[in-house]
C-alpha cells in the first residue's frame, strides 16, 4: 500500500521549519522513500540510499536539478532572458563530462595551498568583527554581527568584489532561491526578476572588467586564465553563472554552518566549555555540527531510468530530494543519532558536504572559517550563551538550513 506520509511533508512551515527531525525520523521508519506531492519530489531519507545515489551519476543525474518547478509568467522570464540569466548552475547542475571540465578549472582556483594561505586574513576579519562587540558584557544578533558578514567578506574578497557592494550582493544571492522556490504574486515575481537581472549584469560587467584588467591574487582572474589541455577555456556566460554559484556557496554554507554550530554548542553548555578549555577539539566539533544539523540540508537528483530504493519503485524522470539532514541521523549508521556529541568519532562519515563527484569544492574553506571563528569566539567570549528563551529564526528553504537571527549574550 502506498504511503500517504509524503503529504505531511511541510518543511517550509512550523513546526517542521524549526525542527524537522521528528518528522524525518518517522519517514525513515515508516516510508523511507516516498513522494511528496506538494513539491513533486521523492523524499530519500536513509543514509545508505542517499549514499548510493550520490555514487551513481549514471542513474541519478544532477542535470537541471535546480530548475524551478514553478511556471513563471512570460513577462518575468523575458526580464531574466534579456539579462542573460539562465538556470544553469555549473558544478551543482552538471553531470560528467561537463562537470569534470568545470571542476577542473575550479580546482585550480581553489587549491589547497591557496585556501591555507587565507588563514591569517580570515583571522583578521574575525578579530575585526569581534572588536566591534562590547568589551565586557553585552547582547547581540551574532548572525548580523559575525556569522553573516565574515563569510561574505571572505567570499567577495576572493572574487575581487568591492567591499562596499557586499550587502547588495548578499541580497541578490537570495533572489533566485525566493523566485524559483516559493509562492508569490506576479508583481513580486517581476520585482525579484528585475533584481536578478541587475545581479547578472553586475557579474557580467565584473567578469568583462577582469578580462581587461587581470589581478594576480583574484579567483576570477585565475578562472579566466586557467587552461586545461584538450578543454576550451571558460567563456563569459560560463564565468557569470559560475561566479554566482561560487559567491552563494562560499558565503551561504559557512554562514549557516557557523550559525548552526553556535545554536547547538550553546544549547549544550558543557560542549562549549570543553572547546573553551581545549580549542584543539574544535575541528571534530565542526564535523559533529555538519552531521547533526548540516547547512546544506538536502540536494536534488533525477532518475534516468526506473529504479528501486528501499523496496520502493521510482519511475524514470522522477526528481529526488536527498535529505542529508535525515541521512545524517540514521540510527542504522550512528548510535544515539539524535544526541549532539562533539567527541563522536564517526561524525566525519556525515554527508553534510555531499559525497564523491559532487563533494563540495569549498568544504576546506568552510571548515577553515568555522575553525578560526570558533577558536576566536572561545578565546574572546568564553561566557557566551543564548539569550534566555531564544528561538532561532529560519528562512523557509528546501535545500539550506541556518538561523537568520540568533541572539546571544555574554558577561565578563
Image (cartoon, rainbow, N blue to C red):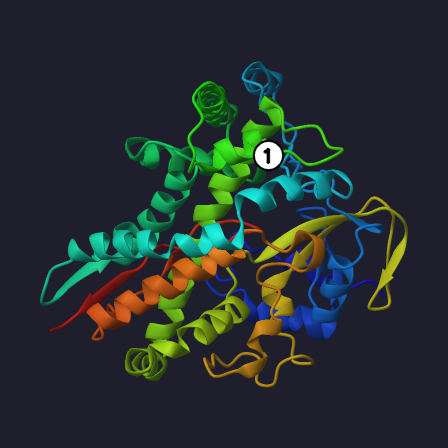
What is the x, y in percent for residue 266? 33, 73
Visible residue check, residue 183: no
User: Where's the N terminus, which quadrant?
Assistant: bottom right
The residue that mark 1 highlights is: 226
Q: Please state which of residues 46 and 135 is positioned toward the viewer in this rendering.
A: 135
User: Of helix, strand and loop, which one carries label 1?
Assistant: loop
For the point 40% across and 62% down, the residue is 370
For the point 39% across and 39% down, the residue is 156
Q: Residues within 10 Å of mark 1 (few under 14, many from 20)?
A: some
Q: Residue 90: which quarter of the image?
A: top right
Q: Is residue 96 above or below residue 282?
A: above
Q: Is residue 345 above or below residue 110?
A: below
For the point 45% across and 80% down, the residue is 342
Visible residue check, residue 191: yes
User: Where's the C terminus, which quadrant?
Assistant: bottom left
On the rendered structure, is 137 left or right of 95? left
Q: Residue 49: which quarter of the image?
A: bottom right
Q: Please state which of residues 167 and 192 is positioned toward the viewer in this rendering.
A: 167
Q: Please state which of residues 362 and 220 is positioned toward the viewer in this rendering.
A: 220
What is the x, y in percent for residue 88? 65, 32
Amino acid at each position: 500500500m502506498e504511503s500517504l506520509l509524503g503529504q505531511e511533508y511541510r518543511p517550509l512551515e512550523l513546526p517542521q521549519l524549526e525542527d524537522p527531525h521528528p518528522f524525518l525520523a518517522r519517514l525513515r521508519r515508516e516510508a523511507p522513500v516516498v513522494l511528496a506531492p506538494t513539491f513533486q519530489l521523492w523524499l530519500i531519507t536513509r543514509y545508505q540510499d542517499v549514499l548510493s545515489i550520490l555514487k551513481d551519476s549514471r542513474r541519478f543525474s544532477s542535470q537541471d536539478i535546480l530548475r524551478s518547478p514553478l511556471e513563471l509568467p512570460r513577462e518575468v522570464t523575458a526580464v531574466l532572458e534579456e539579462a542573460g540569466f539562465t538556470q544553469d548552475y555549473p558544478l551543482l547542475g552538471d553531470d560528467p563530462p561537463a562537470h569534470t571540465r568545470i571542476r577542473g578549472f575550479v580546482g585550480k582556483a581553489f587549491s589547497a595551498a591557496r585556501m591555507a594561505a587565507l588563514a591569517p586574513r580570515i583571522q583578521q576579519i574575525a578579530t575585526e568583527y569581534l572588536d566591534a562587540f562590547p568589551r565586557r558584557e553585552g547582547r547581540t544578533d551574532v548572525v548580523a554581527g559575525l556569522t553573516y558578514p565574515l563569510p561574505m567578506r571572505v567570499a567577495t574578497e576572493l572574487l575581487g568584489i568591492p567591499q562596499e557592494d557586499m550587502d547588495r550582493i548578499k541580497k541578490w544571492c537570495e533572489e533566485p532561491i525566493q523566485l524559483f522556490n516559493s509562492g508569490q504574486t506576479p508583481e513580486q515575481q517581476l520585482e525579484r526578476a528585475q533584481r536578478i537581472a541587475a545581479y547578472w549584469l553586475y557579474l557580467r560587467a565584473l567578469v568583462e572588467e577582469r578580462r581587461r584588467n587581470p589581478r594576480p591574487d583574484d579567483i576570477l582572474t585565475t578562472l579566466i586564465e586557467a587552461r586545461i589541455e584538450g578543454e576550451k577555456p571558460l567563456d563569459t556566460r560560463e564565468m557569470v553563472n559560475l561566479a554566482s554559484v561560487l559567491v552563494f556557496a562560499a558565503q551561504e554554507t559557512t554562514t549557516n554552518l557557523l550559525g548552526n554550530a553556535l545554536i547547538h554548542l550553546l544549547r549544550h553548555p558543557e560542549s562549549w566549555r570543553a572547546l573553551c578549555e581545549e580549542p584543539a577539539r574544535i575541528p571534530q566539533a565542526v564535523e559533529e555540527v555538519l552531521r547533526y544539523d548540516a547547512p546544506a540540508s538536502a540536494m536534488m537528483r533525477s532518475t534516468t531510468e526506473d529504479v528501486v530504493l528501499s523496496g520502493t519503485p521510482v519511475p524514470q524522470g522522477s526528481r529526488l530530494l536527498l535529505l542529508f539532514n535525515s541521512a545524517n541521523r540514521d540510527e542504522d549508521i550512528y548510535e544515539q543519532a539524535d544526541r549532539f556529541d562533539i567527541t563522536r568519532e564517526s561524525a566525519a562519515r556525515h554527508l553534510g558536504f555531499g559525497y564523491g563527484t559532487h563533494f563540495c569544492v569549498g568544504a576546506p574553506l568552510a571548515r577553515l572559517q568555522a575553525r578560526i571563528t570558533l577558536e576566536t569566539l572561545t578565546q574572546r567570549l568564553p561566557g557566551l550563551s543564548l539569550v534566555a528563551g531564544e528561538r532561532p529564526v529560519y528562512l523557509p528553504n528546501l535545500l539550506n538550513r541556518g538561523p537568520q537571527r540568533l541572539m546571544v549574550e555574554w558577561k565578563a
